[in-house]
Amino acid sequence: MADNRKTKAADLTEAQAEREITDLTRTLLSAEEAYFGKDAPEIDDAEYDSLKSRLAELEAAFFTLRLPESPIGRVGSPPAEGFGKARHAQAMLSLDNAFDAGDLEDFVSRIRRFLGFDTSEFPGFTAEPKIDGLSLSLTYRDGILEQAATRGDGTIGEVVTANVSTVTGVPLRITDALGFMEIRGEVYMSHDDFHKVNESQREAGGHIFANPRNAAAGSLRQLDSNITRSRPLSFFAHGWGQLDGSLGDDQLSAMQRLSDMGFAVNPEISLCDGIEDMVARFQNIEAKRSTLGYDIDGVVFKVNSLALQRRLGNSSTAPRWAVAAKFPAETAWTSLDSIEIQVGRTGALSPVARLHPVTVGGVVVSNATLHNEDYIAGFDSEGERIRGGRDLRIGDWVQVYRAGDVIPKVADVDLSKRQSGSVPFHFPVTCPVCGSDAIREKGDAVRRCSGGFSCPAQQLERLKHFVSRPVLNIEGLGERVIEQFFEESLLREPADFFTLQARLREQGVQLNTRAGWGEVSEANLFAEIESKRRVAFAKLLFGLGIRHVGEVAAERLARHFGRWERLVACMDEDRTPLEELISIEGIGGKTAEALAHDFQQAATRHAIDRLAAQLDIIPAAQPAAGSGLHSGKTIVFTGTLLKMTRAEAKARAEAMGMRISSSVSAKTDLVVAGEASGSKRKKAEELGVEILTEKDWHRLLEE
């Protein structure tokens, strides 16, 4: 594994970070819809996860720049229609990624810091190939297979129990089983079987699968289980969810126990005793990649000790004790056919390269990000030359790069093939949709339409966002339908979705008189809209599309305020709400300002209130583990803790249902004061807030 370090987030300027976050988010959303929702990936798993890892890194360092539509915080996509739905007993999380030896070192260092280990202590890791397949959860009760479900969105998946009976590596009955077991793994199709299936499909005039992962997913997710049985699928177990009891003391012995029970476990799994051993093991598995007989896209490293895994716990989307080290991708050359300027929900003008379709690493690429006007001109946000200062022009022969941080992107241009008479691309200074001035503020890499809510493009994109999969996920309201209703002025703001049926009735209009609509589809649409009136606080807040208020920020805000009415009351106080907003752990100044701005703008606030009046807003739920005495309390940590790192202390507090704050105020319930605690402890004393020593904190944890 080459130590080819990409620019660390900490080394980027805010303008550079914002540019990259915008590009990554757009690319991921397009890839996610194709990959998870349609089983027809635009990019392969390695590149999808690579993108997501880089975006997570940037959002952690620049959390105020996180876009509302960010895919970080979600796992997979909502379960498809047509299958029964099942809630996983324990959420199925994704994995954070590493792309080089430096990333692996950072991963190990984070674990050491979290656990309070010194640099000489190495926790020990297992290494195993990362199968490029479809995630599956198998539920056993008293040794009998009770249910099989896909990952879905990580919380709710599709029930495919009838389809797994012939999957190799999945036992239907287990001896020496625990009372209840959730076993996780990947369903895949071997290379030989993939070619046989495609040959059979070709002879029958059926659909030809693009790759083994696509074939495995399409075969398992068949409503007719006879089709699944006719296709050879295999399964590797790699972990578990909820268990009645324990499978062992460490990952390796637990995997051996699963093997003894009859599950297929990858024979390449092994132990690593140091970072050098981890890198060597990665290189060894990469060298074997073409000979394994099935697709892999990296190597998964897990802390071997299950006790340490429990201490490390999970972030909102991934376990802290595991990482997926990904294989590098490829490049290709093609022509730049045109440059299109898209206007986003927040007014950002984003250039997109329309390419002559080219295959890169087995995936057809026809679009790529161009970042912003500086990138097209051959400069970065600091004015430094990139690509040797070579600009990009329509008709150029360009190199497309699909690996690491920004994928796919146009990485270079071949000037020897530049067409005579080509001219530099002139980036627009007015919005291509509404004609308003497109302003680029000082220090900002992005030019934005100044039209605000009067810009049809921004209105339309907000509507699409509100009903998208990550938010309300209203089936039947695809982009084309929304665009049609928008053109007819039936939709202008989110509240219009819930008044649409009544307004059409008042006008005596029926959808089923239009092309593409029938009585059933019309009834289904309005039934679907009605079913989404009950919405979680965090989902609603995220769905508003407020700049910098993404899913993670919305969850933090919802946990802090609990009820929608409390957030509204905060915004309506005479004093500015910024002080309380900024005190919330993980909510920075830009997020607070953006939220306060939208709530305090008259037109925007009226639109928000009209929407809220149409909905039944579900208060933020407390974690199941947080039902005790201190659930719901706000806690601040200050000073140095000796027996537990600050990160672990916060994780334990959140598991108890407590709210973490970064500043002390009259609304703070507890302050844990370690050594060398200063101004926060002093302020707590002045306000009469209860102060705990580290010893008191550990006693509280024991209780």
Image (spheres, rainbow, N blue to C red):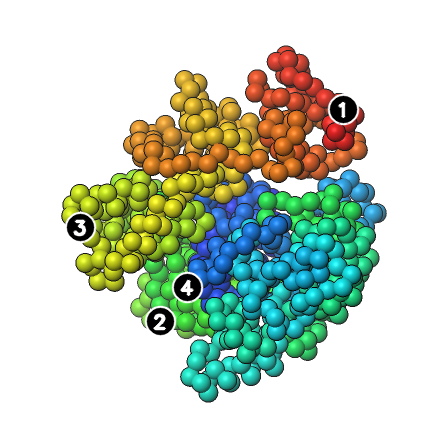
Query: The N terminus appears in which quarter of the rendering?
Result: bottom right
Quadrant for residue 404, please give it.
bottom right
Question: What is the x, y in percent for residue 585?
Answer: 58, 32
Residue lying at 51% horizontally and 75% vertically, measured from the top left? 227
Q: Secondary structure at mark 1?
A: helix
Labels 4 and 2: the sequence-earlier one: 4
- Mark 1 or 3, closer to the camera: 3
Question: What is the x, y in percent for residue 167?
Answer: 62, 72
Given the current orientation, which residue lies at the most extreme bottom position? 203
Labels 1 and 3: the sequence-earlier one: 3
Amino acid type at circle 3 is: Val
**Marking on residue 509:** 3
Amino acid type at circle 2 is: Gln
Pointer 1: what residue? 696
**Marking on residue 419:** 2
Residue lying at 31% horizontally and 28% vertically, measured from the top left? 602
- Mark 4 or 3, closer to the camera: 3
Question: What is the x, y in percent for residue 165?
Answer: 61, 70
Given the current orientation, which residue lies at the most extreme left position? 508
Labels 4 and 3: the sequence-earlier one: 4
